Image (spheres, helix red, strand yellow):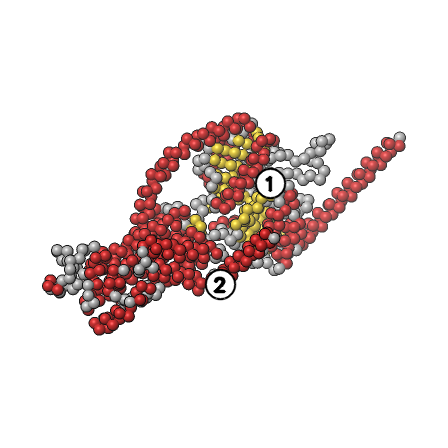
Amino acid sequence: GGGMVAAVAMSRLVARRQALRARTATPEGFEARVAAVLAAAEGDIGGAPLCRQESICARSLSTFERFLQLLPPVSAPQAAAMRATICRLAAAIGQPAAAAASRAGCATASAANGISPPGALIEGAPSVASPLLTTARLADVLVARLHATGSMLEAVQRLCLRPRPTVRDAFFFPGAQSLSHLLRLISSARFSIDLCVYCVTDETLVRALQSRAEAGVSVRVISDDEQAFNRGAALFEMAHFAYTVVDEPSAQDEVTGRQAQGEREKRLHHKFAIFDSRTLATGSFNWTWSAHSRNCENILITSAPEIVSQYSSQFERLHASLASKNSVSTARAATRLQAALRGRAARLPPSMGRAATSLGAARERLSAAVESILDASPGGRVPLGTCRALLQKLNPKPTQATWLTVAATAEAVASLRRRVAEAAAAQIPATADGRCLTHPAEDEATLSSPVPASATSLMEAAAVSCTKETSAVAAHVSAAAYAALRDLLSSLSALGAALEEDLLIAPPRACSCLFFPSMVAREELCRWLAGAVYSLDVCVFTLSDRRVADTILEVHARGVPVRLITDDVTALSDGSLVFKLAEAGIATVVDSDFQIWKQDAAPGQPRLAGTAPRHMHHKFALVDGRILLTGSYNYTLSAATANHENVVVTDDAYHVAKYSEAFYFLWREFRKAMFISRQEAAVRIQKIERGRRERSATATAARAILIGVRLGSARK
């Protein structure tokens, strides 16, 4: 009974949230929320005590934040529209509630004196309620509005956006430049390197890891057990400086020593590395010489926390399950690891102290830059380029974006108070003895009581009487205050646009990490591929899984353009479905041999020295040109059911653009010579099927002959 009641209550809560989203997730609903916050902020300034004003404003802002949390994920243009709406309503919101209460009394006095209210001087400004309210409390009301605006902008950045990853790149091989980028990434590690890779044979990469280990960096390696004994493998060499473990071997038959019947061969096929627990490198790249000098490979680099954390958890799970029984030189590697950790602990306090010392200076520089932005274009719209140029000089971190908005709000509040005081001082000049004139031509005999020349006193001086001169002063001060408010709101909007463009991004709508072996992850991969509406580009080393092939054929049957790039060797392997897809009409190409060029060829002589076999070893797919799936996963049944594999799914525009460019380059290169037509696919399928039948018949005849021989010998 209690569980049923809780389930009903939860379903009602979900229904109410969905109804609220449907009702408020509109421009009109958002504008109503913003107007409510602004009205609460400036309406409560009038008569409530200061503590009550702050609590009421805090409650209205917390309500606005809860509203943002209920909204569905927003895109970057939607976040920009929200920012523009907040600044627009803050600049043109209706009159303050306290001013409306006494508006009627001032209207008669203003009409009798023959002057127009400040609302006629600047559009959107409230009419003057009374000289006392307009001059003495106008700054407080506008400051409350400006502070509420900055708080809402910060809430939108914090709840609807997220900091841009500090590291974001993609390396494609073969290429010496990509190798140098990878070596630079290894050398940048300061605390830890966690490597989980199928094969390690390249001496250059091994030396780079060893140099970091000698510098005190903790290096842990997980690799495949079979690759550890291959020719050129460096795992045993790496055990001298890294904590190295291998995966468990496949189950073997006790008599023959071969793989047990019904057991699939298991491989640790991951190809990822984590640097300092915050930067991930994953893709199809094995750490071998042929991978960076000949094969078609890729590495995705990201520091997105939602992706790095999942790969770190996967590494720790694998390491915990394998380290106790499959470590390589456990004692020596453990000693090395302890020494590295001791060195790391000894280095942490000085670095933290330096960071704490430089924090104040950095904030001062950022505050100075914000002040420059606010004063960049008074009286007009602040160019976006000005904000970006001032921010780029300081090179702030993406995590400092919301702090910059808070700092800009504080600077804007101080600037608004200063400008209002300057406007009041210009209209009410003080005498030498500290008293204040309401009009420059007025006699000293008609002077009011002495008033200090501070900002508040200067504004209160305009409220001595309701004469024509006093009302004119109030009108000019009010107009100047609203002009200053609009300038500062324009500057805040430009600063927000610069932060959104350089430091913030919209939360990803497609962000997932798939780890194998897992049939659930296999189905999720197929769902991502089946979601293609406009295009599907697949670039994979081998394709033999019928479930994935059927998904691609379904997408093609809906009329979606599908292109496939694969390896020429694996396309001919047993079980490959490449020619089946090509026969169905899917545009398919395979890679060509790697061309070796002469570096010192004389003029007029051919530079082509020859060709060498290579592999098209990529494993990525592009869905609709906006979603990327990449990792170590080949589209095979063993990859889904037996191997340790990974796939990262992301809609990051930078990574999608880089991989789209790489796919276009490969398609243009291979299409000229290695395009597979329908007729060629049909002929190839017939040959493969004929060869399979011939091999099957030969094996059957051989078994029959063997059985006959054994029976004959038994009879004898």
Q: Please name which of the two marks, 2 or 1, marks the residue nearer to the observer.
A: 2
Dot 1: few (<14), some (14–19), or many (≥20) neighbours within 10 Å?
Answer: many
Residue 15, image x and y in percent?
54, 59
Residue 493 seen in render: no
Which of these two is toward me, 69 or 419? 69
Which SS class for mark 1? loop
Asked whether the viewer can see residue 15, the reply is yes
Q: Position of residue 192 (x, y in %)?
A: 47, 35
Q: Residue at x 33, y 53 (%)?
A: 51
Distance between mark 2 and mark 1 Cα atoms: 46 Å
Q: Counting residues from the N terminus, which is met first, the one under dot 2 or under dot 1?
A: 2
Q: Is residue 470 left or right of residue 230?
A: left
Query: Residue 593 or 69: which is nearer the viewer?
Result: 69
Instruction: Residue at 59% x, 31% y: name it.
Output: 326
Identify the residue shown where x is 77% and y is 40%: 699
Closest to the observer: 155 or 713? 155
Q: Position of residue 671 (x, y in %)?
A: 58, 51
Tell me the quadrant of the picture where the C terminus can be found: top right
Q: Which residue is mark 2?
A: 23
Q: Amino acid at mark 2?
A: Arg
Q: Is residue 402 left or right of residue 523?
A: left
Viewer-proximal residue, 442 or 248?
A: 442
Q: In the displayed structure, would residue 463 be above or below residue 292?
A: below
Q: Which residue is mark 1?
A: 644
As shown in the figure, which amino acid type bears the numbered disc 1?
A: His
Q: Is residue 385 above or below residue 639?
A: below
Q: Is residue 291 above or below residue 341?
A: below
Q: For numbered disc 2, what is the local secondary structure?
A: helix
Residue drawn where x is 52% and y is 59% of the image: 16
